[in-house]
Image (cartoon, helix red, strand yellow):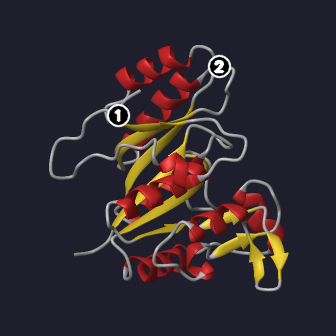
Amino acid sequence: MSARSLFVTGTDTGIGKTLASAALLHALRARGLRATGMKPVASGCARTAAGWRNDDALSLQAASDPCPAYTDVNPYPLPEPTAPQLAARAAGVTVALDVLLAAHGRLAARCDVVVVEGAGGWLAPLADGLEHAGLARALDAEVVLVVGLRLGCLNHARLTARAVAADGARLAGWIGSTVDPDFDRRAGYLGLVAEALPVPCWGVLPHRPAPDPREAAAALRLPDERAAPARAAQ
């Protein structure tokens, strides 16, 4: 049986996709599954003795079991901390879909689930000529939407869900991310998003100054694939 792929996208940039992805890896591993993370294109990398490295990709690598090669987790590490398209142009790099698919294939050969984290929101291109939708379809991945809980999140969540469906991808679930601890209408907005989205909530990540993906995994309630998924407790 081939590995399942989950493609994590968000309602915006900086809303906790990496934390959600790493927490998903820990939650899947707690179920006895071999789960590996992937950050296909990562901008904002630091030069190390081992080469260019990205903090988000390193977090996914650390949360994976079996531990994958960094070059498969992040085939395209780009130095500039900007949109991947601009970072790739600045580095003189052309992002190729076949390279990403080959790296994903090596990861999938060793595990049960590959958690693939996108860059920014769903409609922010991964590279010139490569959209999130194109990669998700090529991987036959189910999409998990991370909703940053703050003013405007209902609109962003609904727009993203519609875009995912219009692009021919499959939305499997969503995760709330408490990006603004002072947002006093969180409970009300959680209810509105739950009503608006056609898929179950897999949990709500609490706000922490220094979040631990293992701790965050305890907030997730993944659906039982043998039964109809239930909405996560809110």
The number of discs equals 2
Disc 1 crowd, CA 10 A, few/some/many (<14, 14-19, 20+): some
Q: Residue 64, which numbered label? A: none
Reading the image, the residue beneath label 2 is: 183
Residue at the left extreme, as displayed: 227
User: Which of 126/152 is in front?
Assistant: 152
Q: Residue at x 63, y 63 (%)?
A: 59
Q: Position of residue 70 (x, y in %)?
A: 62, 79
Question: Viewed as shown, does residue 115 lie left or right of 152?
Answer: left
Q: Position of residue 35 (x, y in %)?
A: 41, 68
Reading the image, the residue beneath label 1 is: 232
Q: CA distance from mark 2 to mark 1?
A: 20 Å
Please indicate, yes or no, whether residue 137 appears anywhere in the rendered image: no
Q: Position of residue 79 (x, y in %)?
A: 81, 68
Quarter the C terminus occupies: top left
Q: Secondary structure at mark 1?
A: loop
Q: Residue at x 47, y 42 (%)?
A: 145
Q: Is residue 219 above or below residue 44?
A: above
Residue type at mark 1 is Ala
Residue type at mark 2 is Phe
Q: Closer to the N terminus: mark 2 or mark 1?
A: 2
State the image quarter where residue 61 is shown.
bottom right
Q: Secondary structure at mark 2?
A: loop
Q: Is residue 232 above or below residue 172?
A: above
State the image quarter where residue 149 is shown.
top right
Q: Is residue 204 above or below residue 80?
A: above
Disc 2 crowd, CA 10 A, few/some/many (<14, 14-19, 20+): few
Q: Residue at x 77, y 76 (%)?
A: 52
